[in-house]
Image: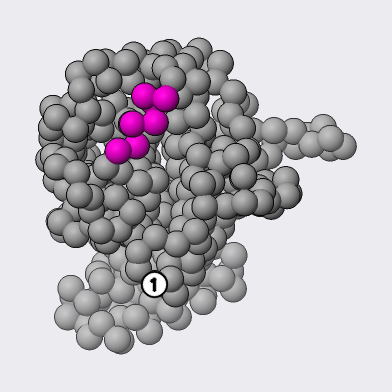
Amino acid sequence: MSGKLWGGRFQNSAEQWVDEFGASIGFDQQLVTEDLEGSIAHVTMLGACGILSQDEVNTIKEGLHQLQQKATEGSLEFSIANEDIHLNLEKMLIDLVGPVGGKLHTGRSRNDQVATDMHLFLKKRLQEVISLIEAFQKAIVTQAEDNIDTLAPGYTHLQRAQPISFAHHLMTYFWMLERDKQRFQDSLKRTDISPLGAGALAGTTFPIDREMSAELLGFSAVYQNSMDAVSDRDFIVEFLSNGSLLMAHLSRFAEEIILWSSEEFKFIELDDAFSTGSSIMPQKKNPDMAELIRGKAGRVYGNLMGLLTVLKGIPLAYNKDMQEDKEGMFDTLHTIVGSLKIFEGMVRTMTVAKETLHKAVHQDFSNATELADYLATKGMPFREAHEVTGKLVFLCIQRGIYLLDLSIEDLQEASSLIESDVYDVLAPEAAVQRRHSLGGTGFEQVKIQIAKAKECI
C-alpha cells in the first residue's frame, strides 16, 4: 500500500526523491489560510444541504478552527509525504477529529479546491497591490506639488529637448500607475469567481449548493462550466501580465532615478535609507534599490512567459503541469509589493536639486523650439524658421554660448523678423508657461493635472 490518502489503487510507494519532485507543499503552504477558509465554507454548505449531519459539521469545523489557530501561531508542521497543502491539512484534521474528518472532502476535488484557494488568495492580494499603488501615487503627487515651478530639461533620445516643469515629468508616472491600478481593479472581476464544487472536472452527484459556498467565501459569481472552473488560470496570467506592465513602468522610473542621482546629472539626491556604499570606494553612494527594481522586472516577465508556456499545450481539464502556476504567482506578488513599498519611500524622501535643474535649463538649447515658433508667428514658414534657428544654434556652439547670450544684432542678422521681445520668449520660464494646452507642461496646467490626480486617489 502506498500510504497516501488517495492510495487505495496503488500497491507500491514511490521513492522519496520522486515524492519530493512531485510535492508542492514547499510553496503552496502559503495558501493555508485560504484552504482552511474554503473548507469551512464547504462543510457549512454540506451541512445546510443535508449531506452531512450537523454533529459531523460541528466536529469538522471545530477541527478546522483549531488548525486556523495553529496556522496563526505558525505551529503547523507540513510533510512532503502528504504532497500539498490540501492533503496536509486533511491529514491534520483527521488526526484531530478522527475519521469523520475524511467526510470534509465530500463533493469536491483537489482540482476545484486548489483553484478556489488561488482565487481567494489573489483576490485579497490584489487589494493590497492596489493600495500600495495609491500610496506611491500620493508620494508622487506630494513631490509634484513641491516642484510645480521647478524647471527641468525635458528629453527625447536622452538629448535635451524642451524645458518642462519637473512636476510634469513626475506626474507622467502617476498616470502610468493609474492605468496599472485600473488594470488590477478590472482583473478583480475575473478573480472574484468561485470554482468550489466543480469537482475534478464534471461536477458531483451530491446535491451541493455552489452559490451558497461562493457567498460564504465572498465571491460575486460562480463558474458556469465545471471543466472551465478547474482548468482556468486566466486570472493568474492576467495578474502576471498586469504585474509585468507595472514593473516595466517602475523600471523606467528606476532608470531615471539612477540617471538623476548620478554625478553627471545631480538632479536629485536619494535618502541614505535607499542607497548603499561601496566596499572599496568610500565616496560612493549607489542607487541600489532602484537598480534592484530595474533588475527584478526581468523575473516578473519570466514568470508571465513561464505560465503562458505551461498552459499553451495542455488539454482539458486539470493536468499536473498546472502545479507550476503557483511559484511564479507568489514570486511576482512578492516582487511587486516590495518594489512598490521601496519606490514609495524612495520618491517621498528624495531631495530635488532645484538649483542644479535651474542651471541645466539655462545652459542648453532646449529653448530652440521657442525661437522657431517665434519666427513662425511672425509669418515665416516653420521649415524656414527651423533652418534659421538651427544655424543660430550652430553659431552658439562655435562661440561656446547659448541662444540667450546672442546679441540682438546677431539675431537680426539671421532674420529681420526678430525683435528685442525675443529674449522674453527664449526665457525657459516663459517657454514652460506658454505650454498651456490641455495636458501640457504649463504651470497652471500642471496644477489642474495634480488636482485631477487627487480625485483618482
Q: Position of residue 128 (x, y in %)?
A: 34, 33
Residue 72 visible to the viewer: no
What residue is rendered at 52% in x and 52% in y? 9
Q: Position of residue 152 (x, y in %)?
A: 42, 49
Residue behind mark 1: 315
Q: Position of residue 256 (x, y in %)?
A: 51, 51
Dot 1: what SS?
loop
Query: What kind of colouring is applied to the model shown?
Result: one colour
Q: Which residues are magenta?
A: 99-106
- The quadrant of the picture occupied by the C terminus is top left
What residue is rendered at 33% in x and 54% in y? 200
Classify residue 391 by image quadrant. bottom left
Near mark 1 (Cα within 10 A), the count class, few <14, some 14-19 or many ≥20, is few
Please tell me whether residue 52 is drawn above or below residue 308 in the rendered image: above
Residue 205 visible to the viewer: yes
- The quadrant of the picture occupied by the N terminus is top right
